[in-house]
Amino acid sequence: MSMPAADAIDVLTFDCYGTLIDWASGIVRFIQPVLESYDAHVTEQFVLEFFAAVEPEAQADGRSYADVLKEVLTALGGRLAFTPTEAQLTGFVESVKAWPAYDDSVAALADLAGKAELVVVSNIDDDLLTASEEILGTTFNARVTAQSIGAYKPSAKMFEAAEAIIDGRSHIHVAQSAFHDIVPATERGWRTAWIRRNASAAMALKASPIWTFDTLADFAEALEFDGG
């Protein structure tokens, strides 16, 4: 299906971590030195796959994302025979505020901000998202966060809250994770654009996005030039 013309889209909804922010690099950058301090040596892929597997379990009761991160690191310690200190647990949470943007995110978001209202739908705490907005150089027009809803994607509650903001307007959901975003959004009848990124560590599901791109920059360009 051809991309719609940019002026035919009113709202773009985004996942943030894994789509705009390079969560994988951020996680590894913090955790690997912690592991080394306990003489625990595993590959980056192991760390990311462990994170992707344990995170949804930690999110099941709707607790804060700060507590989710602490539980995941504690579980990793249990797997690798060490007990993280309180400083390391808190440091993991604070590290989110410095997780980097993907190389194309800042420019692509600036471009897209001129085309549509930007709404973020994210499994995150509000203060952590605010720090990420500074890194992205973007203040979203509206936000749906796990903290504000008390649930995490792929919960329908997150998408229902986003639909209240969209209010029937024309929109596309832009995301990397099939599990958290593409599958549940598609099931709700949303038009979806999958940004593939480094998807190898994400929970694998068969998804059917309408459009697929390697980068957010590719999506922004297609929305500008491929509309009919």
Image (cartoon, rainbow, N blue to C red):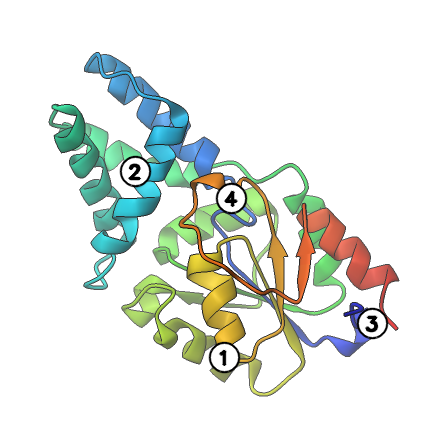
In three-dimensional space, the C-alpha distance between marks 4 and 2, rounded to whole angstroms, equals 14 Å
The amino acid at mark 1 is Arg
Residue positioned 27% across, 14% down in the render: 36
User: Which residue is denoted by mark 2 in the rendering?
Assistant: 50
| Residue 47, placed above or below residue 228 | above
Mark 3 element type = loop
Q: Position of residue 191 (x, y in %)?
A: 62, 73
Q: Please give the count of numbered marks on the rendered protein.
A: 4
Q: Earlier in the sequence, mark 1 or mark 2?
A: 2
Mark 2 element type = helix
Rendered image: mark on residue 199:
4
Residue positioned 85% across, 69% down in the render: 227
User: Which residue is denoted by mark 3 in the rendering?
Assistant: 5
Between residues 125 and 222, which one lies in front from this camera angle? 222
| Left or right relative to 18: residue 212 | right
User: Which residue is denoted by mark 1 in the rendering?
Assistant: 188
Q: Position of residue 114 (x, y in %)?
A: 76, 63
